[in-house]
Image (cartoon, rainbow, N blue to C red):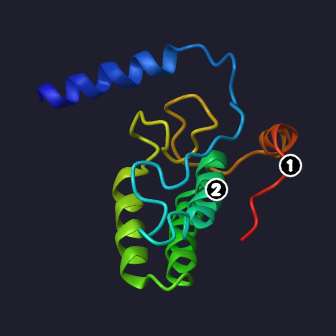
Amino acid sequence: MRLLAILAILFSAASCASQQGYPVDFTTDGCSTSPDGTLSDRERWTQACTIHDYRYWRGGTPLERLEADRELGNNIAATGNPLIAQIYKGVVRLGGSPWLPTSYRWGYAWAYPRGYGHLSEAEQATLDDLETGPPKL
């Protein structure tokens, strides 16, 4: 019960926060709090994580998030690291929820809490004005 009260207060305060300054410019930190590669190739899957960050920055539907996470796993596996791919995919499924007030959550271009949902044409155009397109592998 106490947890529900805390969550209600958190969501209420966040929804009352100013929307000014949103959406924010695209940012990436590679693989966030995880290694970007191996000891011999420290940036081996950085590009895969950057593409994933781009998809998370934009946000969207639950299906789009699932596709982004699958793409991350496939892109890391393509670097010759299938075990790492499965681990990273699992971690982002757990920690990338739009309901967590983190800087790497699903839809982090938008004010918290945005949640899931289709981007309107106006929202897509706004994001397109902020950046030049998704990173390439």
Residue appearing at x 48%, y 44% in the figure: 105
Residue appearing at x 68%, y 16% in the figure: 20
Query: Where is residue 89 shown, x and y percent of the image?
Result: 42, 69
Q: Which residue is mark 2?
A: 55
Query: Where is residue 49 shown, x and y percent of the image?
Result: 56, 61
Q: Quadrant of the C terminus?
A: bottom right
Residue appearing at x 61%, y 46% in the figure: 28
Determine whether 111 is above or below 68 in the image.
above
Determine whether 75 is above or below 26 in the image.
below
Mark nearest the camera among 2 and 1 is 1
Q: Is residue 21 left or right of residue 128?
A: left
Q: Mark 1: which amino acid?
A: Thr
Q: Mark 2: which amino acid?
A: Arg
Q: Is residue 3 left or right of residue 91?
A: left
Q: Which residue is mark 1?
A: 132
Marks 2 and 1 sit apart, C-alpha to C-alpha, by 14 Å
Closer to the camera in the image, 2 or 78 = 78
Label 1 secondary element: loop
